[in-house]
Image: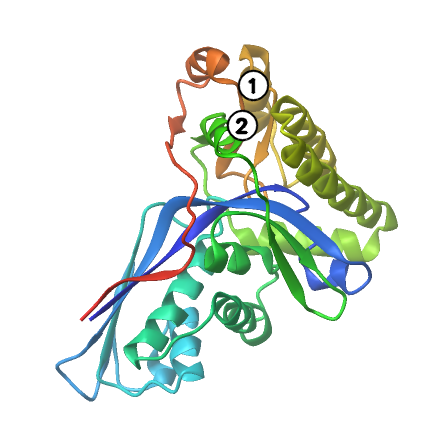
Amino acid sequence: MIVSSAPFRVSFAGGGSDIASYYRRQAGAVLSCAIAKYSFVIVHNYFNENKYHLKYTRTELADTLEDIAHPLLREALRMHRVEPGIEVASVADIPSGTGLGSSSSFSVALINALYAHRSRFASKDQLAEEACKLEIDILKEPIGKQDQYAAAHGGLNFIEFNSNGGVNVQPVVLSSEKMAELESNILLFFTGSQRDTRSVLSTQVQAMETDEDKFRTVERMVQLAYEMRDILMSGDLGAFGEALHRGWMMKRSLTSQITNSAIDEFYDAARAAGAVGGKLAGAGGGGFLVLYCPKDRQAKVRQALSQLKEIEFRFDWSGARIAFAQ
């Protein structure tokens, strides 16, 4: 039995520049962190050697790959030439559609589990590259590359996306005191709504491809990602929170699907209560509200957002790993 895990991520700046329609024209960059909330995949030999037994939100018992309904499972098993006689189950700390990169975390954990099932090692870059191939090239999902690399590597990273398709992952190194302060000053609140990531991202991609002003907005968001990296490394966390707010003002201007009146009310209430800045995690439209707020103001922010569910978390430093093998 193999138990594999990969963390979810919180993106701070540069989102959208990891999509090919942007970085093929101009190099992209994002600043993000992995959090200690995980997608888990369990792989085990199945008693019936003629069947694929798959368990997620539903259960599948399939004779062939073509019979498998779950696209990520079907194509990952095909990529790795996995024959029947295998059981794959998945669970997660946080549901999908909430802006924390759950689909890519699942893909990375699944690919790592399939390698381990065959007693093979895959590097973190290899896991991320294969997850990108699975989701973007094979399944044609309208997504970028940041989630796969964040899930594979873990940690706090500045990730660059080159026009030739290459990806550079650069860990952001802070003192232990500053890293602990940053970690304790980031709050996550679930807005109560999940959304179809494909629809939101497809609209953003179309906007970048057809509207030069929108493309230039993403360009400014990339520049801000570089600025925020440098701010973090200088130790000025207050300026980091202010930059987070500026980035949200840019992002929400890309399409009307990124925010709505309810989300705006939550964000404004959090800022009025003392949060310095924030944004919606992921593509937008719902999911988690990410806030930067010093500890002495957090009680008031929690009171202002008392109707929302807060998720406590810590940073993840391991990335994708095999948690159990026997």
- The residue that appears at 67% across and 40% down in the rendered structure is 229
- Separation (CA) of disc 1 from disc 2: 6 Å
Closer to us: 287 or 108: 108
Question: In the rendered view, would you say 305 is above or below 113?
Answer: above
Which residue position holds label 1?
Answer: 275
Q: Quadrant of the N terminus?
A: bottom left
Residue 252 % position (x, y):
69, 36
For the residues labelled 1 and 2, say whether their Cβ atoms are less than 8 Å apart.
yes
Mark 1 or 2, nearer chain start: 1
Question: In the rendered view, would you say 36 is above or below 265?
Answer: below
Residue 10 % position (x, y):
52, 42
Residue 254 appears in the picture as rendered: no
Which residue position holds label 2?
Answer: 291
- Label 2: state its secondary structure: strand
Query: From the viewer's perspective, is 13 left or right of 270?
Result: right
- The residue that appears at 65% across and 60% down in the rendered structure is 168
Q: Amino acid at mark 1?
A: Ala
Query: From the viewer's perspective, is 149 left or right of 309?
Result: right
Residue 174, picture quadrant: top right
Query: From the viewer's perspective, is 324 left or right of 112?
Result: left
Q: Amino acid at mark 2?
A: Leu
